[in-house]
Image (tube, rainbow, N blue to C red):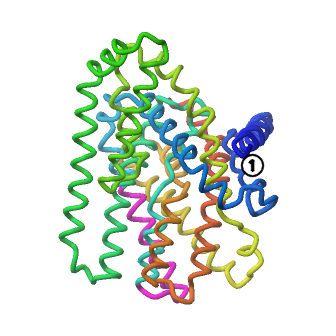
Amino acid sequence: MAVAVILIVAKIFEELIAHYGYPPILGDILAGIILGPSVLDYLSPRIVEELDLLKWLGIVSLLFLAGMETKFSQFIHGIRENLLVALGGIIFSYLLGYFTGLMFGLSQPASLFLGATLTATSVGLTVKTLTDLGAIGTRFFNTIVGAAVLDDVGGLIVLGLTVAMVATGLSRIYDLILTVLIAITFYIVILFALHYGSSTLWKTMKYLGRLEDTPIVYLLALTLVVAWASVKFNLSLVVGAYAAGLAFSEISGAEEVVRRFSLIPNIFASLFFVLSTAIVDIKPYLVHTEYLGFIAAVLVAAFLGKIIGCGLFARLSRFNWYNSFFIGFGMLPRAEVALVITSLGITYNAFGEFNDAVVASVIIMIYVSSIVTPIILRNMWGRVRGSV
């Protein structure tokens, strides 16, 4: 029943939002706010927890599809600019978050965690927005998604360094370096191994199945395995899902695979965005005026870190200024990774008396960046599209 309600409400709001010319993803976010504790409180923590698997199935399938649409050769060709954009966003976001914390009287450990919280882009929302705009396959799509995926590896490094500095004073720096190297090696090996074996694997999948849908089911199962393995190697499962799609992006009949596979994220991706929005009640944090200055400062740091950092480094990749800032805005969304890092900061007692203020700022940042990004990208896309 909960799944039925989510899908119906999400699609109603998607249709309503799309009618006024805005990305349908905003309808999912609005549905999450209304169905969650902020308004109706229909989606209880128990329901959200029980639907967790379906939620992640939606985002895994969406990122697999994004990889299929990107094309392996395009990704490799643009790896330099993707790295630059990711690096710019990480550096600027971390530093702005760190100095914002110090400016408001947070301790150094708390400021370090606040900086780490701002580094990770939520690629799922941007992928859905760009897909709705018809930007799939463009250089902008490839750069934003590629940078966001590399952002995950950079976020791993930043988080590891932060934990090491707060918990052990960098005494475990060698363990961190080893963890990062293993994660990067896994990603490179799985991407190239799957790519060079993709044609054989796809032919085998088709050969083993007489039923029309069997190869698609096998492909989904393989994607889930790669996503699971990514987590085991300290990467996000969306990184593995994107790598799987990227690896199979140039198989024979890829267009038909995309057409048939797209039904999965078209249904289940809505669950991800609704449930991700519905996990926290934002009302208590809006009525405490003592938090507003700090929340506003964190929002400014979160926005400027990606817009300026990613935008400047995109300019180094020979995008013009307007297109560079379009990429910067595309890297704005933050989501579950920001909450995870905040939770780790609380675990290490880094925030102390600022616990509530930091939690409030992160939650508001997630909501605002999720709502604002699709609107900005949609309004900028008309001019950007003319330069494709």
Q: Secondary structure at mark 1?
A: helix
* In magenta stretch: residue 265: no
Quadrant occupied by the N terminus: top right
Q: Nearer the viewer, residue 113 or 303?
A: 113
Find the magenta span and give its range: 87-108
Crowd rating for badge 1 (residues with CA inside 10 Å; few <14, some 14–19, many 20+)? many
How many dots with numbers?
1
| Left or right of 19 on screen, residue 365 | left
Q: Position of residue 331 (x, y in %)?
A: 50, 51
Residue named by callout 1: 31
x 49%, y 47%: residue = 123
| Residue 14 image point, x, y percent | 74, 38
Q: Nearer the viewer, residue 279 or 205?
A: 205
Q: Can residue 326 be seen here? A: no
**Residue 279, percent across and down?**
65, 60
* 98 in the magenta segment: yes
At x 45%, y 88%, the residue is 107
